[in-house]
Image: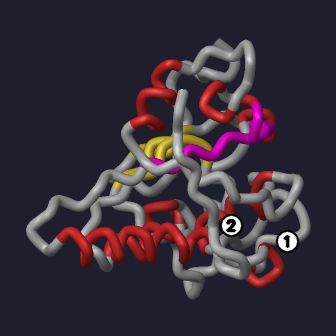
Amino acid sequence: MNKSRYTTPPNMSPLLYVVLCIFVSLRVNGAAVNKPNIIILFADDLGYGDLQIYGHPTSSTPNLNSMASEGLVLTQFYSANPVCSPSRAALMTGRYPPRTGIWPGVLFPNSIGGLPHNETTIAEALKTAGYKTGMVGKWHLGVGENGTYLPTNHGFDYYLGIPYSNDMGPCTICYYPNEACISPLKNPCNG
């Protein structure tokens, strides 16, 4: 696949770069142009070379290939931490994990706190540009009392997912617009 690659300028936060690209794109193309859709895929334990779009010789990812061929593929995002909670905090805020308070390890179901509300997330930045935002999948940045730290309290309009890894306790699912987590009648973790 002949695909041009874009890299993040040196010393620039990937979050800031993505938001800047969006605003520049809107200004260059005029206000009448529809805003582009933005999809960020973030998976635990997925390496840069594990997908076909990045050159893996045997993995077949036709749907991701199709999305990539029609969009912008960023190639210079590095994990800010080897475990998921700090890495997710960095992706959501564009800041190093110690500065977000999500450090040094992962949050657990009984952890107190979560991603501080004074941290600006990519969802909050995009909402100022008129975007609707959604988050699907594992959040792992805190739950709090009555869902205080869930995505819908950090700029996301919609959320369907789990608050932490399935192997960390009761497998609960959080449904929007109910910000509280509920246990399904039949636990999907146990069949």
Give the structural element (helix, strand or loop) at label 1: loop
Q: Is residue 42 magenta?
A: yes
Q: Do tag 1 and tag 2 residues touch (Cβ < 8 Å)?
A: yes
Q: Main secondary structure of the magenta part?
A: loop
Q: Earlier in the sequence, mark 1 or mark 2?
A: 2
Q: Is residue 179 magenta?
A: no
Give the structural element (helix, strand or loop) at label 2: helix
Q: Quadrant of residue 104?
A: bottom right
Q: Quadrant of the N terminus?
A: top right
Q: Residue at x 9, y 68 (%)?
A: 32
Image spot of residue 46 (x, y percent) = 75, 37
Q: Is residue 2 toward the left or the right of residue 158 in the image?
A: right
Q: Which residue is most to the left?
A: 32
Q: Is residue 70 toward the left or the right of residue 1 in the image?
A: left
Q: Quadrant of residue 107?
A: bottom right
Q: Is residue 101 toward the left or the right of residue 14 in the image?
A: right
> Which segment is the magenta one?
39-49
Work out whether residue 46 or residue 24 is closer to the camera in this orientation and state it.
24
Disc 2 target residue? 89
Q: Residue at x 26, y 71 (%)?
A: 26
Disc 1 target residue? 103
Q: Quadrant of the C terminus?
A: top right
For residue 25, above or below residue 71: below
